[in-house]
Image (cartoon, helix red, strand yellow):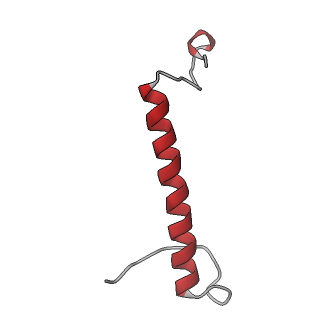
Amino acid sequence: MEKTVLTSLPADRYKAKEVEELYHSRWEIEVGFRNLKSSMLNNALVLRSRKVEQTYL
C-alpha cells in the first residue's frame, strides 16, 4: 500500500517511517478527541457556546 503524507518537517531530520509513526500517533489522539466529543453530545454536555447562558457542565 502506498501512502502520501504532506509535512513541514525537515526531510533531513526525519525518515519517512518516523513521519508515518508521528502521523499515526497524532491520528490516535484525534480519534480520542472525537470519541470524547461524541460521548459529551450524548450526555448533552455543552462546553462552548456563543451565548453565555447556553454554556453549562
Name the residue rendered at 49%, 37% in the picture. Answer: 37
What is the tally of numbered marks visible in this picture? Answer: 0
The image shows residue 42 at horizontal and vertical percentages of 42, 27
Q: Going by the image, does 37 lie left or right of 1?
A: right
* Farthest-out residue, left: 1
| Residue in the foreground of this view, choosing between 44 and 50 | 44
Quarter that holds the C terminus: top right
The image shows residue 1 at horizontal and vertical percentages of 31, 83
* Farthest-out residue, top: 53
Vertical order, 28 against 23 (above or below) = above
Vertical order, 37 against 48 (above or below) = below
Name the residue rendered at 51%, 50% in the picture. Answer: 32
The image shows residue 4 at horizontal and vertical percentages of 40, 78
The image shows residue 21 at horizontal and vertical percentages of 54, 76
Q: Going by the image, does 1 lie left or right of 52?
A: left
Vertical order, 57 against 2 (above or below) = above
Name the residue rendered at 55%, 56% in the picture. Answer: 29
Quarter occupied by residue 10: bottom right
Name the residue rendered at 55%, 62% in the picture. Answer: 26
Q: Going by the image, does 16 lie left or right of 13?
A: left
| Residue in the foreground of this view, choosing between 11 and 42 | 42
